[in-house]
């Protein structure tokens, strides 16, 4: 998934050969001309909750209480840096759509980006309406399923997202090789993502297969004994970390939510570099990598990216050395897509080298790492575009979708592989074997057919 995109808040953009990226010229008041690379869009991650009991406490934790305003003063202390009027606090009564229109009229937003946000918002409100009818938004401060209340809730929370985007534009998030989730003190990005993604998860119609419960218990034991755990499987939506959060919370209770929040995600380029994805990524802990194919895309940055990846692996070894880490790792290096030949969402093949690299780093750390194949069906909450569109923002049409998940019993990475094979053949065989395990579960739990 490789897209070049102009951040929507840029007034004009010119390709600049010297920086290899794109330079954006902003309004005079915003003074500086910044040069920033936005080579692609990847991974938006959204999220949510199910039980209505304890709703009050959860709402308290996840919204930061009533009368919430994005704390721009605390985040950006330079008075003239971020235009304060653009932030929702300055227009407490203004609906998101009105705000969007205002910003558009002031030419702070190009038509395409405005359209993208508008479509996203409209689909989001439809999803939230359906979710609210199931009572799913009660714990997140949406007091009823009435159209007016749902709309107000969506509007408020989308305004917060918009504020973050405006802020991010002036202060791009920096993702170190090891990024630790930002959950305060100024703004709890973790909670924001959890709440924001709740309308996408139809937990009433979701399915976590039966074996997962006992496997989950086993994982907790291993983690508390200081071992490491790797959940290894397919990847379907930008919002996967949040699907995992809501599913774990729904099926495994508070311990599930807690584990989901401390999972380390192996995150590719787009998760960090797509401005629409970054606000959600900030709230998750991640090991950041450049995927192999994307390293080839920009030859002039190859060594920089490779150095970054090496650093990430060292960080991983350090963390694994300390122990108690749970990592979610999708060795396909991209999201599953709908195949024109079958019309179904097919799992993307696993990359043998990615698995090998992970395995060796985990081994070098000197503590046991337990591998659990994991199959997920999350495609419909926020599907990737059918084809890779270059030079364009990726549209985001979300829906209130049923989810499928299975955390399968632990596997020994060598057991499915013939020991007589050569080293390279073993890698290949291991990747294919793991892939088959995940695919057969993906089909077995009904995710494949329910499309
Ligand atoms: C941020 O929100 C998460 C999710 O609700 C919660 O677990 C965490 O304790 C919050 N962080 C702080 C510092 O309050
Ligand atoms: C962070 C944020 O904007 N949260 C708001 C989401 O919407 C509800 C309902 O309007 C508010 O109570 C939250 O503060």
Image (spheres, rainbow, N blue to C red):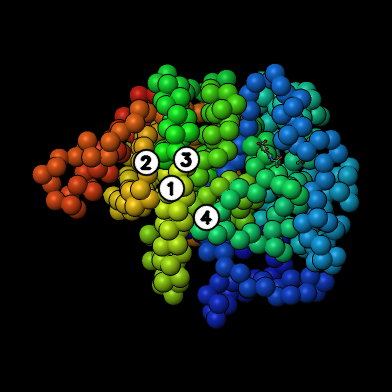
Mark 2 element type: strand
Q: Residue at x 71, y 47 (%)?
A: 184
Q: Earlier in the sequence, mark 4 or mark 2?
A: 4
Q: Earlier in the sequence, mark 3 or mark 2?
A: 3
Residue 310 as seen in the image, left or right of residue 246: left
Q: Is residue 229 above or below residue 360?
A: above
Identify the residue under disc 1.
Answer: 320
Q: Earlier in the sequence, mark 1 or mark 2?
A: 1
Residue in front for this viewpoint, 75 or 389: 75
Identify the residue under disc 2.
Answer: 369
Mark 4, Cα crowd under 10 Å, few <14 / some 14-19 / many 20+, is: many
Mark 2, Cα crowd under 10 Å, few <14 / some 14-19 / many 20+, is: many
Q: Quadrant of ligand 2?
A: top right
Q: Circles 1 and 2: CB distance less than 8 Å?
A: yes
Q: Is residue 108 above or below residue 325?
A: below
Report how far apart the C-alphas of labels 3 and 1 lie in the structure: 7 Å
Identify the residue under disc 4.
Answer: 178
Mark 1 element type: helix
Mark 4 element type: strand
How far across and how far down the image is residue 279, in percent?
Answer: 64, 50
Q: Which mark is residue 324?
A: 3
Q: Quadrant of residue 58?
A: top right
Report how far apart the C-alphas of labels 1 and 2 lie in the structure: 8 Å
Marks 3 and 4: which is nearer the front? Answer: 3
How far across and how far down the image is residue 421, in percent?
Answer: 13, 46
How far across and how far down the image is residue 157, in percent?
Answer: 74, 41
């Amino acid at each position: 998934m490789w897209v070049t995109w102009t951040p929507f808040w840029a007034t004009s953009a010119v390709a600049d050969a010297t920086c290899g990226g794109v330079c954006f010229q902003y309004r005079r008041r915003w003074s500086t001309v910044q040069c920033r690379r936005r080579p692609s869009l990847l991974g938006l991650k959204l999220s949510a909750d199910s039980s209505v009991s304890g709703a009050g406490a959860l709402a308290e934790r996840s919204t930061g209480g009533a009368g919430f305003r994005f704390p721009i003063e605390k985040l950006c202390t330079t008075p003239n840096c971020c235009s304060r009027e653009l932030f929702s606090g300055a227009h407490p009564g203004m609906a998101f759509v009105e705000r969007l229109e205002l910003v558009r009229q002031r030419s702070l937003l190009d038509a395409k980006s405005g359209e993208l946000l508008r479509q996203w918002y409209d689909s989001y409100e439809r999803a939230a309406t359906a979710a609210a009818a199931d009572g799913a938004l009660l714990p997140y401060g949406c007091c009823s399923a009435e159209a007016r209340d749902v709309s107000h809730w969506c509007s408020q929370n989308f305004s917060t997202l918009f504020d973050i985007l405006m802020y991010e534009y002036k202060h791009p998030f920096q993702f170190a090789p090891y990024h630790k989730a930002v959950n305060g003190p100024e703004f709890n990005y973790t909670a924001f993502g959890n709440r924001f993604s709740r309308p996408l998860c139809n937990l009433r119609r979701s399915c976590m297969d039966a074996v997962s419960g006992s496997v989950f218990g086993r994982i907790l034991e291993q983690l508390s004994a200081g071992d490491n755990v790797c959940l290894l499987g397919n990847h379907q939506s930008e919002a996967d970390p949040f699907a995992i959060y809501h599913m774990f919370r729904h099926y495994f209770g508070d311990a599930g939510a807690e584990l989901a929040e401390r999972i380390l995600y192996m995150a590719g380029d787009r998760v960090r570099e797509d401005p629409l994805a970054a606000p959600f990524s900030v709230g998750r802990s991640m090991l950041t990598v450049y995927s192999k194919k994307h390293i080839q895309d920009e030859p002039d940055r190859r060594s920089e990216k490779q150095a970054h990846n090496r650093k990430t692996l060292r960080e991983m070894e350090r963390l694994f050395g300390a122990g108690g880490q749970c990592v979610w790792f999708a060795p396909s290096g991209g999201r599953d897509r709908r195949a024109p030949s079958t019309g179904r969402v097919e799992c993307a093949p696993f990359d043998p080298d990615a698995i090998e690299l992970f395995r060796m780093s985990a081994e070098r750390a000197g503590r046991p790492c337990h591998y659990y194949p994991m199959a997920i069906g999350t495609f419909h909450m926020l599907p990737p575009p059918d084809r890779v569109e270059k030079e364009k923002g990726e549209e985001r049409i979300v829906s209130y979708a049923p989810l499928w998940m299975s955390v399968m019993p632990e596997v020994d990475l060598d057991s499915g592989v013939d020991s007589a094979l050569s080293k390279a053949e073993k890698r290949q065989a291991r990747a294919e074997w793991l892939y088959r395990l995940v695919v057969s579960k993906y089909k077995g739990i009904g995710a494949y057919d329910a499309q």
